[in-house]
Amino acid sequence: MKLLFDFFPIILFFIAYKVTGNNIYIATGVAIVATGLQLAYTKLKHGKIEKIHLLSFVLLLVLGGLTILLQDKRLIMWKVSIVNWLFAAGFMATEFIGNRKTLVQRMMEKTISLPVSVYVKINRAYAGFFVALGFINMYVFMNYSEPAWVNFKLFGMLGLTLLFMLGQIFFLRKYLATMAVNDNTDANEEA
């Protein structure tokens, strides 16, 4: 469900693009407003906004605003790659800054206990995924039509993200199975 919430502005961008007869400037404005509303909702519901989401919004506001003002669609197309690369940098930076817990470990450790080396592998996989996604986005917008890029932005990126997450589940399955066995053993010992 969180994935759909995260893709909400992109879905509205896509719908606005199609409804307006492929007007990327109106669609960009819709994405800016939708992302602003998304952040406001997050702030009201959770009391805070993650820094990376705020940074993403600022980039959207600046590059999306310039896209509309200068009527240069390349700026909004570049924004997608820049945000993905910032995500990658954020994942990698957590290995070396602060308490050196990876971002993945901080997100997952309350629900799943893994060896630190596994958290590091998953963290690096996320970083690599976001770097690759940034370059794939560049390739698509530089080599295909604007409508093809818009379709890729929604369907291609969502599909790649889902495939990546399935790969992560496949990778974690042996650890999840071990946890289930340990939980059953603990429950039997308590009884």
Image (cartoon, helix red, strand yellow):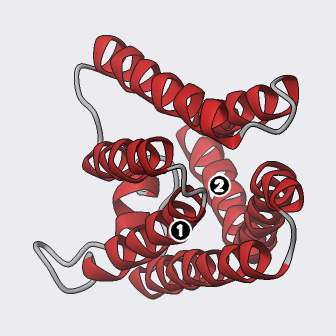
Of the pair 107 and 31, the residue shown nearer to us: 31
Give the answer, above or below, for where 15 lies relative to 90.
Answer: above
Give the answer, above or below, for where 174 lies relative to 158.
Answer: below
Residue at 63% over, 30% down: 26
Q: Which residue is mark 1?
A: 78
Q: Which residue is mark 2?
A: 185
The percent coordinates of residue 39 (x first, y second) are 37, 26
| Residue 175 can be seen in this image | yes
Q: Secondary structure at mark 1?
A: helix
Q: Residues within 10 Å of mark 2 (few under 14, many from 20)?
A: few
Q: Amino acid at mark 1?
A: Trp
The percent coordinates of residue 111 (x first, y second) are 50, 47
The percent coordinates of residue 128 (x first, y second) are 57, 85
Could you say which quadrant of the image residue 145 lies in?
Answer: bottom right
Quote the CA–CA distance across marks 1 and 2.
52 Å
Q: Secondary structure at mark 2?
A: helix
Q: Amino acid at mark 2?
A: Thr
Of the pair 143 and 6, the residue shown nearer to us: 143
Give the answer, above or below, for where 22 lies relative to 162.
Answer: above
The percent coordinates of residue 8 (x first, y second) are 65, 30
Q: Residues within 10 Å of mark 1 (few under 14, many from 20)?
A: some
Residue at 49% over, 41% down: 68
Tag nearer the camera, 1 or 2: 1
Left or right, residue 125 beside residue 107: right
Earlier residue among tags 1 and 2: 1
